[in-house]
Structures are given as structure tokens and as C-alpha cells.
Image (cartoon, grey):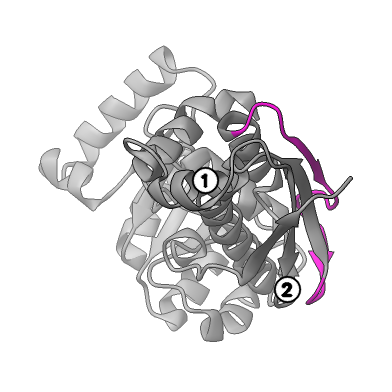
Amino acid sequence: MKQFDCLIKSALKEDLGAGDATTEVFIPEGVRFEGRMFAKCDGVLAGGGAARRVFELADPGSRTRVLLKDGARFKKGAVILTVRGSRRLLTAERTALNFIQHLSGVATRAARFAGEIKDPRTMVYDTRKTIPGLRELEKRAVACGGCANHRRGLYDAFLIKDNHIAMLGGSLERLKERLAYARRNYRGLKLEIEAQSLTQVADFLPLGFDIIMLDNMSRADMKKAITLIRAAGGTTKIEISGGVRFEDLAALSRLGADRISVGSLTNSAAALDIAFDIKRAWR
């Protein structure tokens, strides 16, 4: 978790500024405290390591134990973390909670979506709709909830969207030319293209893409597109995308696509209700 130290230090600095005025004035120096972080609702844990690292960086003499592993399902009242240290625990409290509440909210939402899938070959994937700076932690949280990670950025896979096609003048020949170039010079990167109509699916299918994304198509057209792609007998994977809601997920998964990408896993996850209690340590 030390690879996120820069991010965590930035979060602490944002909160601390010139100093924790309340703690410095009202809490005596030199006194030892012990705290516990506990769940106020059921959920799935993510961000336990980040929360621990917040305490370690804010209070280097503290001792933190994370009692549950990331990905663990827990019930209301479960103790997630205990810590013993100086008054700086109070300085670290909010930042530690911000990380673990948000990331556990993502993991819990992902678990809910994963549990709604009705076809075992279909997986729910996240997207790049993440909070700036938190993408890697959020994608870890998605995996904790049982969903899969799409590309991590613009660098590790091709995703040709409608705007890319428009900037090629909508020319299928220019698309084929650029595709050949990509295959020669970017070996190992998956090639995915977004299709918004059955005509585009039929045009793109012979080009041998790794993945064809069915974007914002009607359910009837998606069903026809999936039949068309499967009938070709190739290795092209099928992805459904575009404003996927939880209430639509079960029906969409029955269509038989390989992937359903859902931006709301990360950009609409509510913080999980996790609390932190602290008291003076007498031993």
C-alpha cells in the first residue's frame, strides 16, 4: 500500500493545512489513545490498507491492525480496524474514513451488480469514470466486489469510439488502414470498437476486433447483434455499454454478452456507513 503514499499524504495535507487546531488545543500531548473502526451496516470491505496507511503516516508511532481482508463481506457491527497511538489519531480519523467509506461503497455496489448477473459467461466491468487520482484504488475495490476491470487508462488498450470514427471521416477504408498500423506497432494491446447500429456491427465484424461494444443500442438490436457476432464463429468478445442501470442488468445479462460495462460502479457509489470510536488507553 506504500505505492499510494503520495496520494495519502496529499489527502492528509488537504485536511491538516497549518495544523489540527482543535486537537492541539483541547487534547493533551503525550496521552495514548486506542480507536476502533466499525461497520454501521452490512457491506463489502475495500480500502482497509489505505486506512491503515493513513494512521501510519499521520502518527508514525501508532500500531494499526486491520481485522478483515479487502473483499470480506461483513455485517453491521463488525470491527474492521483497531489502532493505538497518540492524539494524532484524531487528526487522521476523517481521512482514513474517507478512503475506507468510499472504497467500501464501491466494493459493496460492485457486489450487488455482480450478484444480479443471470448468465455465468457474462461479467460486469467498470469504466474510466473514476475520481481523479483514485482510479487504481477504485478499480481494486471493484474487483473486491466481484466485478472486473476494464482498461486502466488510455495506454493499455484501444477503444475506438464514435468520435474517433468521425475524425476518420467515417471511412471504413481509413479505419482498416489505422487498424493495420495499430496491430503492427502496438502488439499486445486489445483492440475494441464501439458500434451504435447493426450496420456498424456488420461492417466491423470482419475486421477481427478483440471486442465489439454495443453502445446505447435497443435491446432488440443488441439481441440481433449478439446473434450475428456469435454466428461468425470467431473469437470476438461482445460488450454491452451505455447507461446500464441496476434494474436492467438481469435482463441484459440474459442476452449472452461477455461483458457489461457500468460506469456507475465507481461514479455513483454511495459511501458506506463506517464509524470510528476513540478512547483513552489506560494500559
Element at badge 1?
Answer: helix
**Percent x, y of residue 161:** 29, 48
Give the quadrant of residue 274: bottom right
Counting other residues with Cα less than 10 Å from the Cα at mark 1, is it few (<14), some (14-19), or many (20 or more)? Answer: many
Figure check: 9 above or below 260: above
Give the quadrant of residue 168: top left
In the image, what residue type sits under mark 1? Thr
Q: In this view, does 237 lie to the left or right of 10?
A: right
Q: Which mark is residue 115?
A: 2
Give me the residue at 52% from left, 45% from top: 91
Say whether residue 236 is visible: no
**Percent x, y of residue 150:** 53, 46
**Percent x, y of residue 100:** 61, 54
Quadrant for the C terminus, please: top right
**Percent x, y of residue 237:** 58, 50
Give me the residue at 62% from left, 33% from top: 59
Give me the residue at 42% from left, 76% from top: 221
In the image, what residue type sits under mark 2? Gly
117 within the magenta span: no
Foreground mark, 1 or 2?
A: 1
Figure check: 134 above or below 242: above
Q: Residue 91 carries which label?
A: 1
Range covered by the magenta-colored residues: 59-77
Nearest to N terminus: mark 1 or mark 2: 1
Q: Which mark is residue 114?
A: none
68 within the magenta span: yes
Name the foreground residue: 41 vs 205: 41
Counting other residues with Cα less than 10 Å from the Cα at mark 2, is it few (<14), some (14-19), or many (20 or more)? Answer: some
